[in-house]
């Protein structure tokens, strides 16, 4: 993907992302073509390939946008569960689209790449993992936390996202409290 921050390129990328998401609501991801994505916009194929190499590149760009927003919120908010559930609430439709296409794992893969980097690069004062991990080996503990919470989220999505996230947060909070005794 082209990383240009030119306002025109940014708008074009966003149009292609929105077109892909719109198509994912109607068609299985595997059946969507670059041609369809381009036709959903007022742009041309050349512009698509100036910004992306494939439809996977478009999807990954959107996932990266959402993960970036998520991680910025994690750094600012002292309660990671609140950030996670706010992210899920905001991205209900996208989570549902990923689930429908058996692609939720893409979020987990990206989180497993990004969260350890945040732990390494964020000063300890603003590090959301400092309280959880302390001075312990971070790699396994971060992987454990990401896997645990995101498997819960995936279960919620599989069940149709019917239960209020606040209830799930309460259940998890009680469980975490029991573990700390």
Image (cartoon, grey):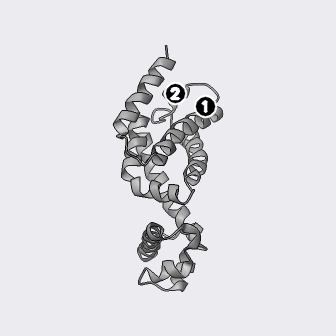
Determine which residue is flagged by label 1: 141
Give the side of residue 174 with respect to residue 118, left or right: left
Q: Eyeballing the image, is 148 above or below 16?
A: above
Give the vertical position of 169 relative to 96 (above or below): above
> Which residue is drawn at the image coordinates 57% and 79% (left, top)?
49
Residue positioned 49% across, 86% down in the render: 44
Distance between the alpha carbons at the discs numbered 2 and 1: 9 Å
Q: Which residue is mark 2?
A: 132
**Extreme-top residue of the structure:** 181
| Coordinates of residue 109 in the picture (x, y in percent) | 61, 50
Q: Residue at x 62, y 32 (%)?
A: 138
Question: Badge 1 local density, few (<14 within 10 Å), some, or many (20+)?
Answer: some
- Marks 2 and 1, the one that precedes in the sequence: 2
Residue 162: x %, y % from top left: 37, 45
Q: Position of residue 118 (x, y in %)?
A: 54, 43
> Label 2 neighbourhood size at 10 Å, few (<14), some (14-19), many (20+)?
few
* Contact (Cβ within 8 Å) of mark 2 with mark 1: yes
Assign a secondary structure to mark 1.
helix
Image height of 29 relative to 165, above or below = below
Image spot of residue 67 (x, y percent): 49, 52
């Amino acid at each position: 993907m082209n990383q240009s921050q030119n306002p025109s390129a940014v708008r074009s990328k966003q149009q292609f992302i929105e077109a892909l998401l719109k198509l994912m609501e109607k068609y299985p991801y595997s059946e969507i073509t670059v041609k369809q994505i381009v036709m959903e916009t007022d742009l041309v194929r050349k512009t698509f390939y100036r910004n992306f190499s494939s439809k996977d590149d478009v999807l990954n760009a959107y996932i990266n946008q959402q993960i970036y927003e998520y991680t910025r919120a994690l750094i600012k908010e002292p309660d990671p569960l609140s950030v996670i559930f706010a992210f899920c609430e905001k991205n209900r439709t996208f989570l549902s689209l990923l689930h429908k296409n058996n692609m939720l794992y893409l979020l987990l893969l990206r989180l497993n790449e990004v969260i350890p980097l945040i732990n390494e690069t964020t000063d300890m004062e603003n590090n959301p993992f400092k309280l959880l991990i302390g001075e312990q080996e971070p790699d396994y503990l971060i992987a454990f936390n990401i896997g645990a919470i995101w498997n819960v989220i995936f279960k919620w999505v599989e069940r149709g996202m019917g239960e209020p996230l606040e209830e799930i947060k309460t259940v998890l909070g009680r469980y975490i409290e029991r573990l700390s005794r």
